[in-house]
Image: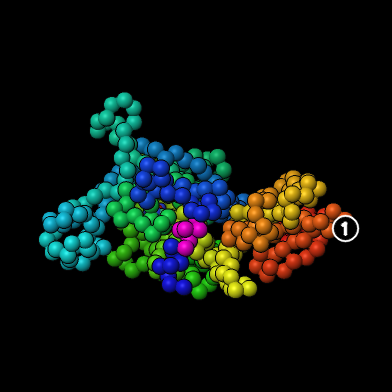
Amino acid sequence: MQKTDLMEKIVSLCKRRGFIFQSSEIYGGLGSAWDYGPLGVELKRNLKNAWWKSIVHNRDDIVGLDTSILMHPNTWKASGHTENFTDILVDCRKCKKRFRQDMIGDKCPSCGARDFTDGRAFNLMLKTYLGAVEDESSVCYLRPETAQGIFVNFNNVLDTTRKKLPFGIAQIGKSFRNEITPGNFTFRTREFEQMEIEYFVRPDEAANIHERWVQDRFEWYLGLGIKKENLQLRKHADDELAHYAAACTDVEYKFPFGWSELEGIANRADFDLKQHSKVSGTELQYTDNLTNEKFFPYIIEPSGGVDRATLAFLVDAYHEEEVKGETRVVLKFSKELAPVHVAVLPLLKKNADIVELAKRIKQDLHRDFVCVYDDTASIGKLYRRQDEVGTFYCVTVDVQSLEDKQVTVRDRDTMQQERIPVDNLKKYLSEQIFN
Ligand code: GAP
């Protein structure tokens, strides 16, 4: 399959089956803004839950936080975003189009002219005004990263949890950037979700702990089903490091449009707490309770994008195979991520007894599993539909089921079918899905 074809197929499947829609479509759409449909919202939520479970619930050294999108404007002065969070833009004097200087050569990508204006810095933060008056005193920004909400709450979390170094604070939330060149579907957008960890460590332990996080985060993607050949680590060269970073390694995924960043794991040194202490006048230091030594911890920051990861899992799960002369499309999501666990399908929708038993089974299963009932097509079509959205098992109720109280359970990946007694169905599915 051509790589561009694959991306087109994913975008089309996402729309057709309710994973992702263009935002404000009925008004012609809003560039680079996307809405998650009924299946997309389940997939994205499963991804965030898997992250939260492994980062917050399964560890003693990390706690969660949910901070506001709007923050005091001085936050961004302290963090360096007001001054440094910029792209250099140039305008083509002939066709009047605007480009990021670092993304073009000496020729205009649109009209081929070689006549550009000088580069000008363009800040990527989305600006708004709070309250009734729109002037400089009411300027506020939509946060461009969730990290700063964590740094400014350092004392609050330390005081309320009494954590000792090394410890971390994790947060999932929306961030906003006025990207000049958004694109590649949900890969680069102006509104997106991040899942970030700020892990506070003693300065002399920072390099080792950074390395450990790089490995842990790489393994996390593999554990949720990404194929190893599609994942790589890339260390930043010194001249690519952000203004705050002492070191950074990206986890990259092999998207159809090329290797691209899923997550960055940075060693931010003591930049953030020092800066916020300086600008706010509130001391954000850590006190060692044995030695009474006061110091600014270093920060290791694994920072991933929820939308990018969701897209990577969609691409990685996409399979096409020939079955009896037809193409079967199947999304082979892992059990943690699959938006639907079980579909209950009556073989004959005109047989009231079959429909009643199928609906009863669905009612019973949906307490433990994410379940759907569908009787709107022939069984062959229903199977294909469920394969295409990655449903783990199809349970089919037929005439025989009324007699022997057994149903057919079909496995998504092998397409093997097994007869299972209705009374054992829950136990059987639990063993397959949750073990
Ligand atoms: N606090 C550090 C930070 O924000 P970043 O590398 O700018 O670092 C972290 O962003 C992650 O957020 C990226 O690896 C990516 O997954 C996601 N991300 C950043 N900009 C994005 C955008 N415009 N659209 C979608 N995801 C984005």
Predominant secondary structure, magenta span:
helix
Please state the extent of the stretch shown in magenta in the rendering: 9-14
Q: Which residue is mark 1?
A: 404
In this view, the residue farthest toward the top is: 132
49 vs 287, left or right, is right
Q: Is residue 110 above or below residue 279?
A: below
Q: Residue sitting at 52 percent across and 61 percent down?
A: 314
In this view, the residue farthest toward the right is: 403
Residue 131 visible in the snapshot: yes
Q: Residue sitting at 32 percent across and 43 percent down?
A: 126
| SS type, badge 1 | helix
Going by the numbered disc 1, the residue's amino acid type is Asp
Q: Please state which of residues 263 and 380 is positioned toward the viewer in this rendering.
A: 380
Residue 205 visible in the snapshot: no
Residue 102: give x, y in percent of width and height. Answer: 24, 62
Q: Residue sitting at 42 percent across and 55 percent down?
A: 186
Residue 362: give x, y in percent of width and height. Answer: 73, 48
Q: Please state which of residues 106 and 54 is positioned toward the viewer in this rendering.
A: 106
156 vs 235, left or right, is right
Q: For residue 125, what is the image quadrant?
A: top left
Quadrant that contains the C terminus? bottom right
Q: Where ligand 1 lies, by quadrant?
A: bottom left
Residue 309: give x, y in percent of width and height. Answer: 49, 58
Q: Is residue 231 above or below residue 358?
A: below
Residue 158: give x, y in percent of width and height. Answer: 51, 43
Q: Please state which of residues 258 and 323 is positioned toward the viewer in this rendering.
A: 323
Q: Residue sitting at 20 percent across and 54 percent down?
A: 97
